[in-house]
Image (cartoon, coloured by chain):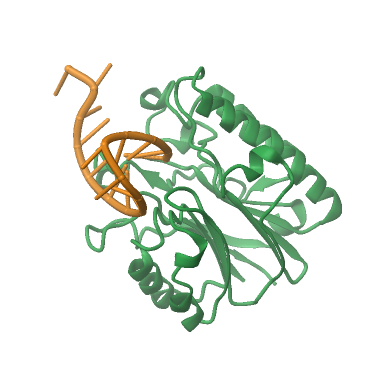
Chain colours: A green, B orange
Amino acid sequence: MKIATFNVNSIRAREELTIEWLEKKNPIDILCLQELKCEETKFPKESFERLGYKIAVNSQKRYNGVAICSKRGFERVKKIFDIPVLDEQKRLIEVQIGDIIILNIYAPHGESDENDPKHKFKMDFYDALKKYVSALLHMNERVILTGDMNVALANIDVYDAKVFENRVGFLESEKQKLRELLKIGLFDCFREKYPDKKAFTWWDYRTAAIWRDEGMRIDYILSSAKLLKKCIEINVDLWTRRRRSPTPSDHAPLVAEIAD
DNA sequence: ATGGTAGACGCTCTA
């Protein structure tokens, strides 16, 4: 089973590119999308349905928005988590596919200024997420958490640790929150598989950073211990990113193969 | 010198 996570930076702007990518690749069974930037009703469902996907969307106008597209169907779609900081914006969606729980997340971006309310929102979001996922892991042995976590964990996860010092996504407080999430029983599949490999999932548009590979690894496929053992391969796919036309997202998809 | 691009929306915010 192939599972991918992709921050598309507007599904409407990236519909053509995403569909072309899906057609070109060996079948992606489960595609987790973030930053749809459109209302639920405006998600181009038909294009994905034509490729055999069933779609679950939790989204809002202009900002945020997540979706899960599955060739294997799904049940138990969850969009409301009854935790105010997680429900305030459309950043989470969960489904069950067979005996696996998939939780797809677009974590808040935050700000480099730790006094900014957006930083607090990010910290609170992570605290609430840890609490929720902790309970989820107690009830299920097979959990996959995918998405844009907006945090790079270590020096190897940014092109230059000096450059990223005190920058959003690389603050000590942010790394701490993501590490805490991993401590409750989630594993960073990419880093577990490739302890020394440098591979990024996001490059700044503004500096055309993709052409110098000056990026950050902020998108993840995290799994419970049981599923980590079944992770056969995991890699960043640059096909949608290293191009000028059609305009790419600032992120690239991360794709994992999990043994059935 | 506090830049630069991209997207949605509508005269600006978010990333």
Q: Is residue A54 visible?
A: yes
Which residue is located at x 74 percent, y 46 percent?
A82
Residue situated in front as seen by the camera: A208 or A212: A208
Where's the N terminus of chain A, which quadrant?
bottom right
In the image: residue A25, left or right of residue A78:
left
- A225 w.r.t. A100: above or below: above
Image coords of residue A28 (percent x, y): 52, 71
Of A34 and A237, the residue lying toward us: A34
A101 or A90, which lies in front?
A: A90
Residues A85 and A109: in front is: A85
The image quarter containing residue A185 is: top right
Number of on-image labels: 0
Q: Which quadrant, please, contains the C terminus of chain A?
A: bottom right
Is any atom of residue A175 visible in this view?
no
**Residue at image location 44% in from the left, 66% down from the top:** A42
- Residue A132 in percent (x, y) is at 75, 43
Residue A110 locus on image (x, y percent)? 49, 31
- Which residue is at 49% across, 49% downward? A64
Q: Is residue A183 above or below residue A64?
A: above
Which residue does the image show at 67% across and 46% down from the upper left? A187
**Which of the 4 image quarters holds residue A239?**
bottom left
Task: Using the image, determine if residue B5 lies above or below residue A119.
Answer: below
Q: Residue furthest right?
A: A139
Compared to A256, does A27 lie above or below? Answer: below
On the image, the x and y values in percent for residue A252 come to 41, 54
